[in-house]
Image: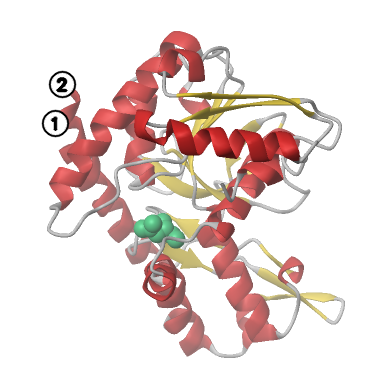
Amino acid sequence: YSLLFSIAKGDVFGKDQPVILVLLDIPVMMGVLEGVVMELQDCAIPVLREVIATDKEEVAFKDLDVAILVGSMPRREGMERKDLLKANVAIFKSQGAALEKYAKKTVKVLVVGNPANTNCLIAAKSAPSIPKENFSCLTRLDHNRARSQVAMRCGVPASHVKNVIIWGNHSSTQYPDVHHCKVNMSGSEVGCFEAVKDDAWLKGDFISTVQLRGAAVIKARKLSSAMSAAKAICDHVRDIWFGTAPGEFVSMGVYSSGNKYGVPEDLIYSFPVEIKNKTWKIVNDLPVNDFSRSKMDATAAELVDERDTAVTFLGE
Ligand code: LMR
């Protein structure tokens, strides 16, 4: 609900690009979805040509150009991590197989539902004829959170902060890294440590604030982040569509194969990426110090563990 209006009115694919929105939900939600369709129609948006609501994967995934997989099985009280992974493997295996069968081979797939990295990996593995590079998971929300924390600390707009990095998993082990971040302070670009002038904060509370922000929003709102997640999804997909600005990189969970940072292969791991012609490339030449190294390794270890548990459910 938070996401649809922005996409429909051209924030993602451009103001002149006609859009057909296909909305997939589970059967019990079809009545509610009808109401959402009515609202979208009532917005009278010229580029929104059609809205299709369905509970059938063969309808939802047919000839798709872009798939945003938002839904997943949320963790319930008393649920073990393993049970959560098992339930989500079933969902993302099925959606991956539907992409394989029905979507265009050029489809771009963004996985948002948690555990997003591992869900994305399972979807990609279940769609072997779609290039692995077409799959990514959302860490732009963490990226935006990091950017905004630095901006507020420096008293500048968020647009004056660039090249923060989120490494690894969209979980509390993620590593928000500002060693390559630049801040525009009164017209001149300086390194983040120089701009903030508080190394202890940048190496301590800044990191934990970003890592735990999702949980803090849930605690306060009694609901998971929605507005900020929708904004991050739009930022992520718009950058895939139109590319990143020269000299700027963004964070995305992408296939780790071939990375130069020693991150194990066959993971969906968040890296700094540049995007051109709808194709991302890991920014592979940034120096990494010991502080960063250990945090990048810790989040990689969590993802290896998640993957190894998840793939045991793939054959079921
Ligand atoms: C967030 O980062 O806000 C969400 O991924 C948190 C959650 O668990 O839904």
**Category of crowding for the residue at label 2, using alpha-carbon neighbours closer than 10 angstroms: few (below 14), some (14–19), many (at least 20):** few
Q: In this view, does 89 lie to the left or right of 177?
A: left
> How many dots with numbers?
2
Q: Are marks 1 and 2 in contact (CB under 8 Å)?
A: yes
Q: Which residue is drawn at 81% across and 28% down?
A: 17
Q: Name the residue under label 2.
A: 315
Which SS class for mark 1?
A: helix
Q: Which residue is drawn at 25% across and 33% down?
A: 89
Q: Nearer the viewer, residue 269 or 118?
A: 118
Q: Is residue 230 left or right of residue 160?
A: left
On residue 312, the disc is 1
The amino acid pointed to by label 2 is Gly
Q: Is residue 162 left or right of residue 218?
A: right
Image quadrant holding the C terminus, namely top left
> Ligand 1, what quadrant?
bottom left
Q: Nearer the viewer, residue 143 or 269?
A: 143
Residue 94 x, y percent position in the rendering: 32, 22
**Category of crowding for the residue at label 1, using alpha-carbon neighbours closer than 10 angstroms: few (below 14), some (14–19), many (at least 20):** few
